[in-house]
Amino acid sequence: MLKGKTAVITGAAKGIGRATAIRFAKEGCNIVLNYRSNVSDELIAEIEGYGVECMPFKADVSKLIKEAKKKFGSVDVLVNNAGITRDMLIMRMSENEFDSVISTNLKGAFNTIRFASNIMLKQRAGAIINMSSVVGLIGNAGQANYAASKAGVIGLTKATAKELAARGITCNAIAPGFIETDMTDVLKEM
């Protein structure tokens, strides 16, 4: 079902994004790995070991989506996984700490959806998967920015699903609980 399709995955160098990229590769998808800092040669080799192509991409999301379409001819799956935390009690949280989390986690998802949906609408098919968090549903002390961003992702997902469903595009959110990754390692230090 996914063989020969193209999956664009943000935040794919580590953690949940890395595991997602490997899983889609196992299913036969070509993978576009979007990352912030670096991506290991081992990850690229592992993905390509499943007989698919892997395109690592560190850049603006508008260029990411255009280059994915140019290289593979389609964008069939978009997984919005990129996310950051800047945990701090709300009375000590700076506006910059709030804004950076909202910008990466929510606005980043909005932008990739905006660019990918143009391609998916022309294809009359596609799947968008947004990574939210249980924190977006229940909140968490010290994570007002993160909770707000992930609650926003849920709202964005619902609106996008209603907008695009009639054209054969699905949009869903996954809201996992705590999963140990490089991003959550910072919690051990608190």
Image (spheres, rainbow, N blue to C red):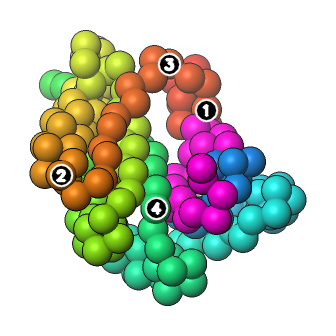
Q: CA distance from mark 2 to mark 4?
A: 16 Å
Q: Mark 1 touching mark 4, by CB under 8 A?
A: no
Q: Which residues are magenta?
A: 1-23
Where residue 54 sits in the image (x, y, percent)?
A: 69, 68
For the residues bearing labels 2 and 4, Cβ distance under 8 angstroms:
no
Is 154 situated above or below 5? above
**Which mark sits nearer the N-terminus, 1 or 2?**
2
Q: Residue at x 55, y 64 (%)?
A: 6
Q: Are marks 1 and 2 in contact (CB under 8 Å)?
A: no
Disc with the residue nearer the chain's start (4 vs 3)? 4
* Mark number, residue 42: none
Label 3 residue SS: loop
Residue topped by disc 1: 181
| Residue at which label 2 appears | 166
Tell me if mark 1 has few (under 14), some (14-19) or many (20+) residues whose alpha carbon lies within 10 angstroms of its own: few
Q: Residues within 10 Å of mark 3 (few under 14, many from 20)?
A: few
Residue 177 percent location from the top left of the image: 45, 18
Q: CA distance from mark 2 to mark 3?
A: 34 Å
Mark 4 residue element: loop
**Magenta region includes residue 117:** no
**Along the line of sight, the residue nearer the viewer: 15 or 127:** 127
Using the image as rendered, state which of residue 86 and residue 133 is in the foreground.
133
Identify residue for label 3.
178
User: Would you identify the image quadrant in which residue 117 lies?
Assistant: bottom left
Mark 2 and 3 residues: CB-CB less than 8 Å, in contact? Answer: no
Relative placement, left or right, of 116 versus 184 is left
What amino acid does circle 2 point to?
Ala
Residue 115 in the image: x percent, y percent? 29, 70
Q: Amino acid at mark 3?
A: Phe
Q: CA distance from mark 1 to mark 4?
A: 27 Å
Q: Is residue 42 above or below residue 59?
A: above
Closer to the eye: label 1 or 2: 2
